[in-house]
């Protein structure tokens, strides 16, 4: 039987595979995070017709004569170049800028994906459209995340609360005017919190005394006196001494920090700048930073980290296996996953409110369709011609 007949058959099979890969790419042109496949061909074994000969004396050497036996698919690889970004404005949509994959858990198996179109389930867990849980690290009660700990499913339930914290220090900053008239009173108010989150107004009344001294009277929002003291400045306006002991508010001692005050003339900028307590709050919304930190916004007006999205990368991303649902599985040739914080260790940064679209280039794929079609046609012509030659041989005997 003619060798060309089998070569033509191998061409049909190989170009059919190329057509399958190209058709799949076109079908997924709008699939979020999809990576296009590419078909690579290689020749098969070649039959040795004449062996090579070495030069001997006056005779030169001869090259081998070989007849190829066709073509086969060497590999179907994935192109991991980034796809275009699409802004969605949806806080649950995430995109990786650069290398890396989101880590998810599906039925107890750790998988990887570039599709960041996440949703929340009934338990407030961050999941993919197929229900796989997005992996990362949860923050503790103080908003601290340990990316060296074990991975866990991220959750953002509406019942997430920020606990109350009693005020320990209330800070006042700014300037008390040195040229103010004696008995000039300036009242500044700050809200402080008890251990159970109860808020209480704290009023400080600064009253100008003769010289560079001001008296300070402290009262609660109901006008009950809580204590007092003095603050003195040098002739140059610098703070000289503060005599103001802590006051007790709702059974909680509160230190009043006046160490940043100044006493220059012509300026009245004294204000209550901060306090370290807080009331309880419930999670209302969240945003994501470039390193994957999920910052929750609570009803008490404060923000705190509630989790960190994990990102994994591989030494050979092309060695990952596609499992369907835009998921990938580690293989023996992909290397072990290097999971950590986005932006570290070669991992790309994250963008919230955006999705990575498919990296399929339709113009290239339609060109590949033509190439596959013409290659298939050429292979079929080889089979037709070989058949005609065999027919001629058969017709030699009539």
Image (cartoon, grey):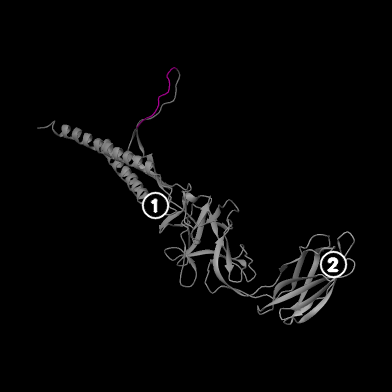
Calculate the distance from the C-alpha at mark 2 to the C-alpha at mark 1: 74 Å
Q: Is residue 209 magenta?
A: no
Give left or right: position of 130 versus 301: left
Q: Which residues are magenta?
A: 58-66
In the rendered image, the residue lying farthest to the left is: 398
Q: Nearer the viewer, residue 158 or 58?
A: 158
Observer able to see residue 135: yes
- Compared with 220, 298 (above or below) is above
Observer able to see residue 1: no
Where is the N terminus found, in terms of image quarters?
top left
* Numbered mark located on residue 181 in the image: 2
* Numbered mark located on residue 321 in the image: none
Give left or right: position of 149 versus 396: right
Quadrant of the rendered image containing residue 361 = top left
Q: Nearer the viewer, residue 108 or 217?
A: 217
What residue do we see at 37% from left, 48% from top? 25
- Compared with 235, 380 (above or below) is above
* Front label number (2 vs 1): 2
* Numbered mark located on residue 30 in the image: 1
Q: Nearer the viewer, residue 222 or 341?
A: 222
Q: Main secondary structure of the magenta part?
A: loop
Whole-percent x, y for residue 192 in the image: 70, 74
Q: Nearer the viewer, residue 70 or 162?
A: 162
């Amino acid at each position: 039987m003619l060798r060309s007949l089998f070569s033509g058959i191998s061409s049909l099979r190989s170009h059919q595979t190329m057509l399958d890969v190209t058709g799949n790419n076109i079908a997924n042109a709008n699939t979020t995070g999809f990576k296009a496949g590419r078909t690579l061909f290689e020749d098969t074994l070649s039959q040795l017709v004449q062996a090579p000969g070495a030069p001997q004396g006056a005779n030169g050497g001869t090259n081998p004569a070989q007849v190829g036996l066709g073509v086969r698919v060497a590999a179907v690889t994935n192109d991991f170049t980034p796809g275009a970004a699409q802004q969605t404005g949806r806080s649950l949509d995430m995109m990786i800028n650069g290398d890396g994959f989101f880590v998810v858990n599906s039925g107890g198996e750790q998988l990887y994906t570039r599709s960041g179109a996440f949703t929340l389930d009934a338990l407030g867990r961050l999941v993919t459209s197929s229900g796989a849980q997005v992996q990362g690290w949860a923050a503790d009660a103080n908003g601290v995340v340990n990316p060296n700990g074990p991975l866990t499913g991220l959750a953002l339930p509406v019942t997430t609360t920020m606990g109350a914290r009693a005020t320990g220090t209330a800070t006042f900053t700014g300037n008390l005017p040195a040229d103010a008239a004696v008995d000039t009173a300036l009242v500044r108010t700050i809200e402080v919190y008890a251990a159970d989150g109860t808020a209480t107004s704290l009023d400080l009344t600064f009253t100008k005394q003769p010289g560079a001294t001001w008296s300070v009277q402290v009262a609660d929002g109901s006008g009950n006196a809580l204590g007092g003291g003095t603050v003195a400045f040098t002739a140059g306006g610098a703070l000289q001494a503060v005599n103001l002991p802590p006051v007790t508010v709702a059974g909680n001692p509160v230190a009043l920090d006046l160490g940043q005050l100044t006493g220059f003339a012509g300026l009245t900028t004294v204000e209550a700048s901060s306090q370290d307590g807080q009331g309880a709050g419930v999670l209302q919304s969240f945003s994501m930073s470039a390193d994957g930190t999920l910052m929750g916004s609570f009803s008490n007006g404060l923000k705190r980290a509630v989790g960190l999205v994990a990102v994994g990368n591989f030494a050979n991303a092309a060695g990952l296996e596609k499992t369907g649902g835009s998921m990938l599985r580690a293989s023996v040739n992909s290397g072990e996953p290097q999971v950590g914080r986005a932006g570290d260790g070669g991992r790309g940064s994250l963008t919230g409110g955006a999705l990575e679209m498919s990296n399929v280039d339709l113009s290239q794929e339609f060109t590949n369709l033509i190439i596959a079609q013409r290659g298939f046609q050429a292979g079929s012509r080889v089979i037709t011609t070989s058949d005609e030659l065999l027919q001629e041989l058969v017709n030699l005997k009539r």
